[in-house]
Amino acid sequence: MDKLLWLKGIVMKKLLVLLIGLAMAALVGCSGGNDKDKVSGGDEPPKMIEVEILLPDKIDPNVETEIKAHVTQGDENVEDANEVKFEVFKQGDKDHEMLEAKHVGDGIYSVKKKFAEEGNYVVISHVTARDMHNMPKKDFVVGNPSEHEAAHESSDGHEHGHGESSVAIDFPVASADSGKETVLSALIKHEDKPLEGAKITFEVWKNGEEKHEFIPAHEAGAGKYEVKHTFPSAGNFTVNVHVEKGDLHEHEEKAVTVK
């Protein structure tokens, strides 16, 4: 009788160990499935942020005017943008004014400004949000400029970051190896002199992909800015060099082939 009870106890212990093992295996399997779901869900690239510049139909000189940008991502209003600025200038002028906007609700960022003169103007919104950057441009008219003035501004028009810019950006990097550290460097000059103490950011993205990476550079010498970066894969990339100092804001895109 005692031997029978002893054997029964051993069998019960083995069954208990087997049940615990099966339960743990089931838990591990569920956890692994959840992890796979997370990975597969995370592989989908985020949608690009979209920016719509909103201006009044009529703008009069010396009257306070509201300049707005509506920032969205898919069907969602973006209310957590890192930075929204408006670059405003009269066509033909080299002096650009940079205005910092504030979020007023529902993804709308706003600033108010008075225009002292009639003429043809340009506004560029610089929006940084959710590791992306977008900078649409819009032309507009203040008052009723004369035909002579409009023709003069059109012939002397200044395209942002190109044409007769007072900023020269020398970016010598044209190729790189994937998976290896590369020094991104740029020599910045303003009016033929090295631009010191500027904020330089390298915006890097692979052509055809929506995600942009913003990498702040450090000043390594007079007007020379650099940072170390590793390209994750081979392909054609674009590096947009952003230059900021006071009211000065220029940018220039460079192509980089990664092997």
Image (cartoon, helix red, strand yellow):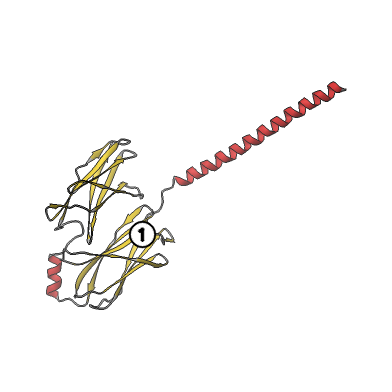
User: What residue appears at the point 70 percent right and 30 percent down from the top-left corner?
Assistant: 17
Total numbered labels: 1
Q: Is residue 75 left or right of residue 143?
A: right
Which residue position is annotated with label 1? 50
Report helix, strand or loop for mark 1: strand
Spot the residue most to the top: 3
User: What residue appears at the point 19 percent right and 60 percent down from the top-left corner?
Assistant: 159
Q: Quadrant of the N terminus?
A: top right
Tell me which amino acid carries mark 1: Glu
Spot the residue most to the right: 1
User: What residue appears at the point 57 percent right and 40 percent down from the top-left corner?
Assistant: 31
Q: Estimate the x, y position of residue 207 in percent, counting from the top left.
A: 30, 46
User: What residue appears at the point 83 percent right and 25 percent down from the top-left corner?
Assistant: 5
Which image quadrant is residue 19 in? Answer: top right
Q: Estimate the x, y position of residue 102 in percent, counting from the top left.
A: 36, 66
Q: Is residue 163 left or right of residue 109?
A: left
Q: Estimate the x, y position of residue 49 in percent, counting from the top left.
A: 37, 57
Q: Is residue 128 above or below residue 259?
A: below
Q: Is residue 91 above or below residue 36?
A: below
Q: Quadrant of the C terminus?
A: top left
Which image quadrant is residue 151 in? Answer: bottom left
Q: Estimate the x, y position of residue 150 in percent, counting from the top left.
A: 15, 71
Q: Is residue 187 above or below residue 124?
A: above
